Image (spheres, grey):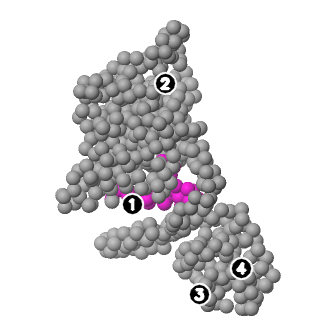
Amino acid sequence: MGEVENINSTFSLIFNEEAQNAVLGHLLLDQKFFIQCLGKIYPNYFNNSKNAIIYSSQLELFKKKHDFPTLNDVLNYYDVYNNKQIPYGDFKSQFEKCIDCKLSNKLDTLREKMTAWMQAMVFKKHGVNAINLYNSGRVGEALELMTKIDKERREISFEDTSRIIFGDFEDYLKKSEENIKNALPTGLKLLDKALLEGSENGGLLRGNTTIVMAPTDSGKTSTLITMACHNVLTEHPVLFMTHEGVPEDIKLQTLCCMMSLIEIKNKSNRFPNGLDRLAIYELKETAEGRKKIKYATDLLDQFLEYRPYNKPGMTIEDVEPEILRAQDSRAALNNGKGFDLLVSDYPAKLSTRMASHGHMPWHIVKQVVYDYYVQLAISNKFHSLLAIQTNREGYKTNKGHGSGGQRLLTPDDVADSYNVTQLANNIISVNRDDKSMLNNLMTLLVCKSKNSKTGKAIVCRTNFGCRVTHTEELGSTCYDNSDSMRNLVNSLLDINEIKMDGTPVDESIKQAFKENII
């Protein structure tokens, strides 16, 4: 019997001993998984030398038989050709332990972790060579090698992407229920329920894509920042990318939003409605204030990774590797778990290399770019939260001067490419005319949802000075209508709450609105 193959002595499976035993148990019992692992998993990757010998025996027998060996084949083969590496009794005892561990560790879960681990190993294996080429001035060769590394990484997968079966409905329905239960929050329960029927904790499903649409300067970035910060507060890792604006300004806006949400949720007496940048400047002058700032920044550093990408001639092909590298880095440091939410502000700033010769219409360019994010969400099992701008008519409509009268914005108002909205699972329009701005109000219309009915309008109180567009504590209400209620939004909010001046709402007013509006 030959020596255990040593491809790279620094490689090992990142799992604990029980999980490694389970991986070997699946290798021994599952022919499809065994074939998937050929050329990817080597005996020396197992920390336990007995596991390495068992897997080595299976591989040698496979080479001799040209067929998947049975459990008895492997046991008998070692009994005859063991070369006294370990006693047969020890071999059989460890063999049976691996089979037992396989029963309590599902292959689907292990596959996902192994894919993330192996993809990270590709960089570990080849990255030093690329760095050495770069340091020696061979930049072109270094770039070529990194391109090959990225291609190899993408092609590696232990997950079963073959034919889908329907007979496993019990397992599938259980996973579906768990996915809904663990959906990511938007920051408003009314919005969560409008996006996802049966929502318990959130409205954004992993693997899905949501597009926030709004006219210029009406709150796209602030809405994305607010949703990102709500996820940070619930400890969901967020990758935040911007392609416009000054990064230092967006960094300060994010800090304002984060600190404001903390103060609002804690019912702070000093900052009951949040902190603007001037308040943060004041806080940093005191020890107690710096303690508050550090608490917020520690949360952001732990659960939000901000990567601005502002360059001339930006393409989605340039940005995609940045996203994948960030995802791989996060997974490598967190036992294979990457980001839950990708926020991009905003993809329409990107082009595609396919349009480099100038023969591709701009609306098709946008469709290609946004489709990348849709596919990234599916393949990486995070939620893509994207922004898009309305056309000029949408801007007029938002201000109340459009030809369509008083109505909320819909996908028809998207600039350049209506096809983009067909790609997303959810579309949310941001509606905020001049009067709403003065009254710190905003209406979010769920224009599209593949997981619930559409047409739900959520009216919420805002504090844009603190970069907070919505949170439960500021108040919100909803109605089923795409007509604008801009003249009634204060009263709509007052139906379910006290008035903003603290006085109770008259019962006759409540009843009138319930009968005639809601």
Could you tell me how far apart the alpha carbons at marks 2 and 1 are, in whole angstroms? 41 Å
Q: Closest to the observer: 232 or 28? A: 28
The magenta stretch spans residue 333: yes
* Residue neighbourhood size for the residue with mark 2, other residues' Cα within 10 Å, grouped as few (<14), some (14–19), many (≥20): many
Q: Closest to the observer: 474 or 358? A: 358
The residue carrying mark 3 is 66
Q: Are marks 4 and 3 in contact (CB under 8 Å)?
A: no
The residue carrying mark 4 is 71
The residue carrying mark 2 is 477
Instruction: Specify the segment rendered in magenta.
Output: 318-341
Say which amino acid is labelled 1: Pro
Q: Closest to the observer: 263 or 358? A: 358
Residue 440 in percent (x, y) is at 40, 23
Dominant secondary structure (helix, strand or loop) of the stretch shown in magenta: helix
Could you tell me how far apart the alpha carbons at marks 2 and 4 are, in whole angstroms? 62 Å
- Residue at the (37%, 25%) spot, across then down: 483
- Residue at the (61%, 51%) spot, across then down: 173
The residue carrying mark 1 is 321
At mark 4, the secondary structure is helix
Precedes in sequence: disc 1 or disc 4: 4
